[in-house]
Every structure is written in structure tokens, then in C-alpha cells.
Image (cartoon, rainbow, N blue to C red):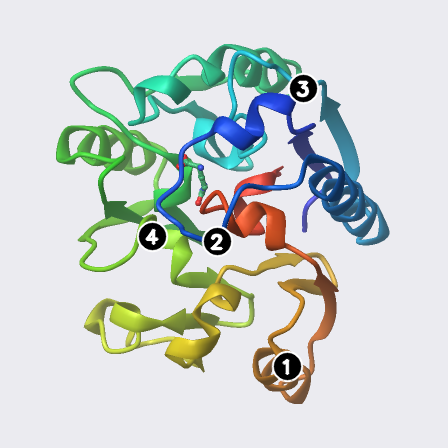
Amino acid sequence: MFNHVIVKKPSKSYVNGLTTSSLGVPNYEELLLQHEKYVSALKYCGVEVIYLEADEAFPDSTFVEDAAVLTKEFAVITNPGAPSRNGEIVAIEKAVQPFYKKIHHIVAPGFLDGGDVLQVDRIFYIGLSERTNEAGAKQLKKMVEAEKYTAHIIPLKEFFHLKTGIASVGKNKLVVTGEFITNPLFESYEKIIIPKEQQYSANCILVNDYVIIPAGFEETNQQLKSQGYQTIELEMSEFQKQDGGLSCLSLRF
Ligand code: CIR
């Protein structure tokens, strides 16, 4: 159950942010509209939204998920692996502070993006990617183990971030695609398998009674519905252009 989410308005500089995609330059007006609908959907799911104003100095800062890892008992401020994004943590720490007594930090030489961290109940899965190095992953593992969680470190083969290809939707179920379909670490879960053509929709989020998924992935929508989930579909085109997905746009706690 989530009570709060942190989101951040996309800045005009967003169009100059980092991307590996060749989907074109984002349209700022459309982007704002999509972001507004994202925020409305979260409110509909029953959470209180902490809305941070845009920061032109950080083009990718609407992707708040990368700057922190939040649990019930403690917060971890990350050390984002992309130099242009590293300073995003200052505003996120400020936003997180009123809610947490215990705040840990990932520090150099460790780097870690929140997009590489999946929590399923008392277990953390930490991806090693272009943005998260072994030192960062090991720091997080140690922190969560000290809090009586367990953690597994997973080197990524094809994905940008761990959560690009995997999501937890409760009830011991995972939405998985690509390299995670056969990974033995996830053997004990029931899997909702997303084929390659629908891969972008593996980055979905369970927010209380709803699973929010990107629009245009009917097969994923049907799979989730047939498993008893209520879904909300959102247009994500302008976020996809900058390698962003649904999970990246909020910190849920
Ligand atoms: C970046 O390259 O950092 C942003 N353009 C996209 C970040 C997406 N975040 C995520 O998957 N957690």
C-alpha cells in the first residue's frame, strides 16, 4: 500500500536530456499533458502527491525514481551514474526528509540509479548497468541487509535499467520480459511474460488497487486483466523518447 508519491514537473530543458532512443525530439506541450495525466492517475489510485517544481538545470530530473530508494522504514539517496543527473539528489533529499528519520546515502566510488532497484516484499534486486556499478550495488545491499532485508545483485545484459524489464505487481507475481524471463533468481514467482514487441510495457507500476501501464499494449493489458487486475493506461510517447517509463516518473512510498 502506498500513501505518498513524489513527482517532479518536466523542465523545458527536458528535450535536451539523455537518450539512446531514435524516436525523435519530445514535444514539450504534449509532455506536460502526459505528465499531468500521470499525476491524475496516481491521485485516482489514492495517494497523496508531493509535486516538485521543474528545475531547468537538470533536464532529466522528472525521472525522480533514479535519485532515491524508499522503503517503509528508511530512505536511500542514490548517487546517480550519469554526471548530468547527479545533482538531482539535492532536491529529492529535501523532499524526502520530512517523511524519514533514517536516510542513508550511496557514495563514490559507488554509483546507483533507483531504476536499477526492484523491491519485492523483503527482497531487493539490484541491477548492474551503465548507471549502477558494483560498488554502488554492494553499498545498497549492505544497507538493506542491516535493515533485515535480503538483496541480490544482477548484472544486466540487454536492459538500460533493471526495471526496464521487470515489475512487481504483488501476489507473488512479476511482469517480466527479455533476460528476466529465464533468470533462475525469479523462479519462485508467478510470471506475466511480455513478448519482445511489447517490451516497453514491462515497465508498469502497481499503485494500490491498480496497475498503471503504457497505452497501446493491448496484449499486456489483457494479460493483466485476465489475472484479475484493474489497469489504467497512459500515453507515454514523450517519456519513451528520452528512455523513460512509468516507474521512473515517481517515488512511491
Ligand atoms: C536518463 O537517461 O537518465 C533518462 N533520460 C531516463 C531515465 C529513466 N529512468 C529510469 O528508467 N528509472
Give the residue at mark 2. Answer: 23
User: What SS does tag 2 mark?
Assistant: loop
**Disc 4 to disc 1, C-alpha distance:** 23 Å
**Residue type at mark 4?**
Leu
Q: Look at 25% across and 36% down and name the residue there.
A: 132
Image coordinates of residue 208 in percent, x first then y, are 71, 57
Dot 1, how many residues are within 10 Å of its Cα: few (below 14), some (14-19), or many (20+)?
some
**Disc 1 to disc 3, C-alpha distance:** 32 Å
Give the residue at mark 3. Answer: 54
Dot 2, how many residues are within 10 Å of its Cα: few (below 14), some (14-19), or many (20+)?
few
Tell me: 168 left or right of 56: left
Give the residue at mark 1. Answer: 218
Give the residue at mark 4. Answer: 162
State the image quarter where residue 212 is shown: bottom right
Question: Mark 3, mark 4: which one is toward the viewer?
Answer: 3
Asked if residue 25 is positioned above or below residue 87 in the image, the reply reads below
User: What SS does tag 3 mark?
Assistant: loop
